[in-house]
Image (tube, rainbow, N blue to C red):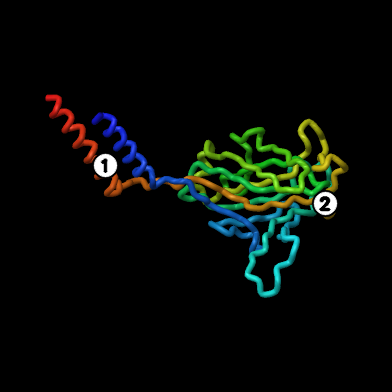
Amino acid sequence: MSTNIRAALITGTAALLASGAHGAVVTNWNFNTAATSADLGHGEANAIETSVRTVSLSKKKPRKGSTQVTNRALEVLNFDADASRSGYDGISFATDTNDFQDLSVSFLQLNGARSSAWAQFQYSIDGGVTFITTGLDDDGKYRVAASKNFTLVSFDLSGITEASNNADFQFRVMAIHAPDMDKFLATSGKRYAATGNTATWKFDEVTVNGSTLAPANVVPAPGAFALLMAAGTIVTGARRRKS
């Protein structure tokens, strides 16, 4: 019985000691302030060979004097009319992952009917000098289906240690040709268009998540010390009774 109590106490101690490293939002963009800078953390969104603007997702305008926050998204438009240029147009996000590890990136995406259905997620560990897809599922390529609702897209970067604790971390989403094709495929399946009201991408709730790095020299909390001492006392008492 004492062995079970000891195991329980050690488990509790481990939980306390691990409490310094926990999941957290590193950076978040919700675009509700009509800005391209991050709403939480440090970061900036930038157009790549495209144009960007914030657009309201609310069907009704808020009443005058209302304190209600307008729900907005970032819209990417004016893609390159040269349909042979796969992977040249999109949107990038720069952030600072110092003191964070085990990263993941997620966002909501809504495509216009004539926009490219296929995109590629790429990341940079050198401040945007080079973008790569090493370690990503399907080489970072994904397709957004036609829908009236946003699609959740996410990428696990926990295995990419170079992205952790990096002040120069960036990622981007680029319009690409459909796999095994030399042309863009429209989200609706109809004719692709580079410009126009239906040739757009919308992004919302762009979020970088991670776990905080534990300090190099962690001093256990008083509660952890108490658990350790209690565990030792129980084991010692058990041994004395056996003798």
Q: Is residue 108 left or right of residue 192?
A: left
| Residue drawn 44% across the image and 46% down it | 22
* Of the pair 212 and 70, the residue shown nearer to us: 70
Circle 2 SS class: loop
| Residue drawn 59% across the image and 58% down it | 38
* Of the pair 8 and 158, the residue shown nearer to us: 8
- Work out whether 180 lies above or below 212: above
- Work out whether 185 lies above or below 41: above
Which of disc 1 and disc 2 is earlier in sequence?
2
Residue 77 percent location from the top left of the image: 77, 54
Q: CA distance from mark 2 to mark 1?
A: 62 Å
**Residue with the mark numbered 2:** 198
What label sits on residue 154 in the rendered view?
Answer: none
* Amino acid at pointer 1: Leu
Circle 1 SS class: helix
Residue 114 percent location from the top left of the image: 83, 46
Residue 166 percent location from the top left of the image: 51, 48
- Work out whether 197 lies above or below 228: below
Q: Is residue 218 left or right of residue 45?
A: left
Q: Going by the picture, which residue comes out furthest to the right?
A: 191
Q: Going by the picture, which residue comes out furthest to the bottom?
A: 65
Q: Which quadrant of the structure image shows residue 238?
A: top left
- Work out whether 88 lies above or below 180: below
Q: Which quadrant of the structure image shows residue 240?
A: top left
Within 10 Å of disc 1 (Cα), the crowding (few <14, some 14-19, many 20+) is many
Quadrant where the C terminus lies?
top left
| Residue drawn 24% across the image and 37% down it | 231
**Residue with the mark numbered 1:** 227
* Amino acid at pointer 2: Thr
